[in-house]
Image: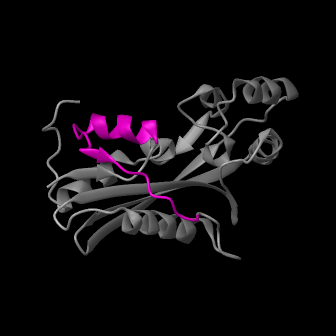
Amino acid sequence: MAFILGSGSPRRLDLLAQLGVVPDAILPPDIDETPRGTELPRPYCTRIARQKVEAVAASPEDVVLCADTTVALGRRILGKPADVGEAASFLLALSGRRHRVVTAVAVRCGDRIWEKDVVSAVRMKRLSVDDLNAYLATDDWRGKAGAYAIQGPAGAFIPWISGSFTGIVGLPLAETAGLLKSAGVSLFQRAA
């Protein structure tokens, strides 16, 4: 049995290492992550994680893990910004407000798929023009859902969360550990 991480995220790799799990291969799938029409954030995130895990080529005895993280402002999905202008608009929309971060995890072995999604609430402080410009200049917003990562410089903007910190980062560890154990992956067995 091989364990395959279907994600190129260094954050997910680091989080798996906390569980003592090191992938035998890293194979990020290439799928269309465009939301459908009026698709809501939680079902969208769950659908994308499932499509990712189904898209990774693996032997029937291999275990594949994929995840998707989405920032939701009400019914609006804030994905990865295309450019600095979109990053600024996302951050201004989140400024001074609570929002949700949804992370869906899917684990596959053969034809069997185990899934779990975790929703956390996050409050971002009201951003000043200086806050916004200084953060955008770091380029940390690139490739981040909602244009920020709580474990990076934007953590200074987050005074309150309710839920899973590791879920907000991109892989809820308690839930992921349960899914991996269900699929027969031993935790804390491999050198981190």
The quadrant in which the N terminus is found is bottom left
Tell me how the rendering is colored.
one colour
Residue 181: give x, y in percent of width and height.
18, 56
- Say whether residue 140 is left or right of residue 190: right
Q: In the rendered picture of this protein, how many numbered marks are placed on residues?
A: 0
Residue 93: give x, y in percent of width and height.
79, 48
Magenta stretch in the rendered image: 9-32
The quadrant in which the C terminus is found is top left
From what the image shows, is residue 190 above or below residue 116? above
- Say whether residue 82 is left or right of residue 17: right
From what the image shows, is residue 183 above or below residue 3? below
Residue 69: give x, y in percent of width and height.
52, 53
Check if residue 3 falls in the magenta segment.
no
Quadrant housing residue 79: bottom right
From what the image shows, is residue 111 above or below residue 52? below
- Kindly identify the residue that appears in the image at 23 percent across and 51 percent down: 3
Check if residue 26 falls in the magenta segment.
yes
- Say whether residue 68 is left or right of residue 21: right
Residue that sits furthest to the right in the current view: 129
Q: Nearer the viewer, residue 33 or 47?
A: 33
- Kindly identify the residue that appears in the image at 79 percent across and 33 percent down: 127
Residue 52: give x, y in percent of width and height.
44, 63
- Kindly identify the residue that appears in the image at 80 percent across and 30 percent down: 132
Q: Nearer the viewer, residue 30 or 122?
A: 30
